[in-house]
Amino acid sequence: MSRSSGDQVPPATASGDRLAVIASHLSSSRLGSPASMAGEKDAALAAEPVDGPTIFDKIIRKEISSQVVYEDQKILAFRDISPQAPIHIIIIPKVKDGLSRLSKAEERHVEVLGSLLYAAKIVAKQEGLEDGFRIVINDGPKGCQSVYHLHVHLLGGRQMNWPPG
């Protein structure tokens, strides 16, 4: 599911066609490109920041298949369906416990937050990213978060230039 850089992201409809926008976001072009950034913004604005079940809950329950690369009692890591880098892994806590976004973290979440980052280190090593990688956590609509289940993006496999351009 790749898109050419000339493709437009469909606007969200009044009825909340968020899945179409999120799908288009997930199939955006390269991370950091203007098209990708616009897609992230549109997907985030179309997403409703709710604490209810998300697509990640379905992945955890194995209702939606995924390419799992790491799993333990607390964490699940799988390949993104539309990678923004040669290696793009999503790392999520198996139990959300109100942790829909990083800004909602409380002291009781310290252990799972550490587990997410430690899992990222393990996955990066297993993926051969000894020379470096990027960790991204989007938070809220203005932070381009489109799925409200805290998740970490592990990106690598090429030099990550920031800011884009």
Image (cartoon, rainbow, N blue to C red):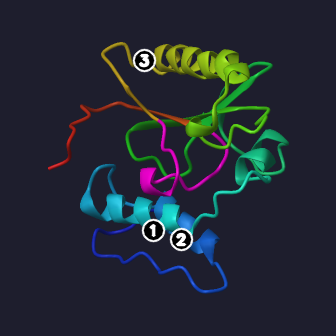
Q: Would residue 1 be seen by someone viewing this image from the given angle?
A: no
Measuring 32% from the left and 69% from the top, which residue is drawn there?
4
Labelled pair 1, 2 in contact (Cβ < 8 Å): yes
Using the image as rendered, state which of residue 12 and residue 6 is in the foreground.
12
Q: Amino acid at mark 3?
A: Gly
Q: Which mark is residue 42?
A: 1
Q: Which mark is residue 21?
A: 2
Residue that appears at 61% across and 86% down: 14
Camera-nearest residue between 30 and 117: 117
Residue 130 place in picture, x, y as percent:
36, 13
Mark 3 vs 1, N-terminal side: 1
Give the labeled residue for mark 3. 128
122 up-or-down from 91: above or below? above
Disc 1 or 2, which lies upstream in sequence?
Answer: 2
* SS at circle 3: loop
Q: Nearer the viewer, residue 1 or 46?
A: 46
